[in-house]
Image (cartoon, rainbow, N blue to C red):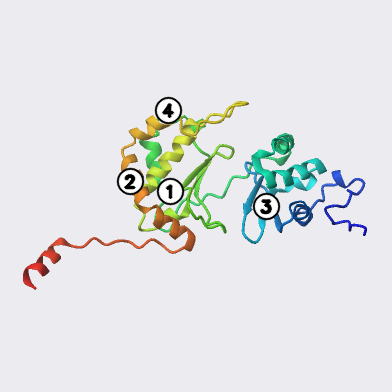
Amino acid sequence: MTPSPTDPRAPAEPGRELSGDFSAEDWARFLSGRLGRDVRVRYGRARRQVIVAFPGPACLRVRMNHAFGRAPQPVRVAVADWLREGRRDRQACRTLDAWIASILASLGPPRAPRAVLRGAHHDLGEIAAELLTLEFAALHPARRPRGLTWGRRGSQRPRRSLQLGSFDPETTFIRIHPVLDQPAVPRWFVRYVLFHELLHAELNQPCEAGRRAQHHGQEFRRREEAYGDTARALEWQARHLPALLRSARTGRPIPVSTPRRPGRILQRLLFE
């Protein structure tokens, strides 16, 4: 039986390796054949995570940069081997790393997100202006982030962890998780999260070849410990993380607890 042109076992057509028309559907068929399971592929424009896998019970979902549409056959095989073995397949990792490094320049500059500062309950612009006036008054203008924004609720609901804020060293944009924009989350906690990300912006250093970036180095820890609300914020986060996770998963806000008035309780005890 002769394999069809879309069969992953089929030999490549002349010129197809450089044609750049290997679609997401082509990738899905190719990887499904190589891995022996259902694989679904979607193209995107991410530059930092050019390929990401999301294992699931029904299928393996893969999101990759659209540049993979022109990946040569050895890279396609390396992708399949990497999805199967992960970091254990060192040759596949080397092949992927080398090819990704070669295409990064062709991906163009990263796109900065649209800034959304005013949320339903907290105003990031107001909090940032306060921080830049007080805690970051000496921050050099070149170190200031290009902008900040509330993030968007993704289709993937978190299960065990939650990234409340992030600083992108490429776009120098700060994102704050939208789960914090609700009445049950105190303003001072949002301020702490924004302080944390502004500290990343100030201390951000370009990565050197062969060395990992230090995200929370000694100076970072020293500065964060000196911030007045760090201990209170970490304690609040530890206490409310399960509620934040549930809120991020369901989209329902955290109930606002109303403190009881001790005078009324005492009055009831005395007169009932």
Please tell me which of labels 3 and 1 falls first in the chain. 3
Side of 233 where 161 appears, left or right: right
Number of the label disc, if any, that sits on residue 62: 3
Q: Name the residue under label 2.
A: 235
Distance of mark 4 from mark 1, alpha carbons? Answer: 27 Å
Residue 15 placed where, x, y %? 90, 45
Structural crowding at the residue carrying mark 4, measured as other residues with C-alpha within 10 Å and reported as few (<14), some (14–19) or many (≥20): few
Distance (Cα) linking label 2 and label 4: 21 Å
Residue under the image location 62 percent in, 26 percent down: 210
Residue 271 in picture, x, y percent from top left: 6, 71
Q: How far apart are marks 2 and 3 (CA)?
A: 37 Å
User: Mark 3, residues whose alpha carbon is within 10 Å: few (<14), some, or many (≥20)?
Assistant: many
Q: What residue type is labelled 3?
A: Val
Q: Say whether disc 3 or disc 4 marks the residue closer to the N-terminus.
A: 3
Q: Nearer the viewer, residue 244 or 172?
A: 244
Q: Nearer the N terminus, badge 2 or badge 1?
A: 1
